[in-house]
């Protein structure tokens, strides 16, 4: 099976477009409290792309988040519509793309779930929910 796949997407207003090559084996969902707060959602799913495999058209707004460890992370989003696009380290080596704005989001199935200690209880039971 081919692990690397091409992805592309744009923010809600269309001001920023991103395409990249990501590894399906590295897609994950993060349930940490920072992801919850910054996304406004219970969890964030991400796909990882190295700097030489991402192309960004337009200039995202950036916010530098300082973690408990003092670690700095760039959080990028559209300054117009607020759509969250990616996080990266201050050296911009590795990009964690938010899968929600990517057209291939349905194929980007998380292989691991991290920080599940802070996952919401209803998420753990989600398979039991009725579909609508
Ligand atoms: Zn936008
Ligand atoms: Zn997180």
Image: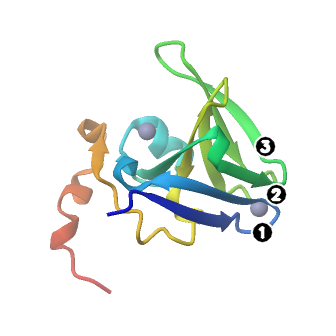
Look at 82% across and 63% down and name the residue there: 15
- The crowd level at tag 1 (other Cα within 10 Å; few <14, some 14-19, many 20+) is few
For the residues labelled 1 and 2, the Cα–Cα distance comes to: 7 Å
User: Considering the numbered disc 3 on the image, is that residue within a helix, a strand or a loop?
Assistant: strand
Residue that extends furthest to the top in the rendered view of this protein: 70
Give the residue pinned by disc 1.
13
User: Considering the numbered disc 1 on the image, is that residue within a helix, a strand or a loop?
Assistant: loop
For the residues labelled 3 and 2, the Cα–Cα distance comes to: 9 Å
Does the residue at mark 1 contact the one at mark 2 (Cβ under 8 Å)? yes
Q: Is mark 1 within 8 Å of ligand 1?
A: yes
Which picture quadrant has residue 75?
top right
- The crowd level at tag 3 (other Cα within 10 Å; few <14, some 14-19, many 20+) is some
Evaluate whether residue 78 shows in this view: no
User: Considering the numbered disc 2 on the image, is that residue within a helix, a strand or a loop?
Assistant: loop
Instruction: In this rendered view, identify the residue nearer to me: 69 or 2.
Output: 2
Residue 97: x, y in percent? 56, 50
Pointer 3 or 2: first along the chain: 3
Residue that extends furthest to the front in the rendered view of this protein: 1
* Quarter placement of the C terminus: bottom left
Pointer 1 or 3: first along the chain: 1
Look at 78% across and 68% down and name the residue there: 14
Residue 87: x, y in percent? 59, 39
Give the residue pinned by disc 2.
80
Look at 37% across and 49% down and name the residue there: 29
Give the residue pinned by disc 3.
61
């Amino acid at each position: 099976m081919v692990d690397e796949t091409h992805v592309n997407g744009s923010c809600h207003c269309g001001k920023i477009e991103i395409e990249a090559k990501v590894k399906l084996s590295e897609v994950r969902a993060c349930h940490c409290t920072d992801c919850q707060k910054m996304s406004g959602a219970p969890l964030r799913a991400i796909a990882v792309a190295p700097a030489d495999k991402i192309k960004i058209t337009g200039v995202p707004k950036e916010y530098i988040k300082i973690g408990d460890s003092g670690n700095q992370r760039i959080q990028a989003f559209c300054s117009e519509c607020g759509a969250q696009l990616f996080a990266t380290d201050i050296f911009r080596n590795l990009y964690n793309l938010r899968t929600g704005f990517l057209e291939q989001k349905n194929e980007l199935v998380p292989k691991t779930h991290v920080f599940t200690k802070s996952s919401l209880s209803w998420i753990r039971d989600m398979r039991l929910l009725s579909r609508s």
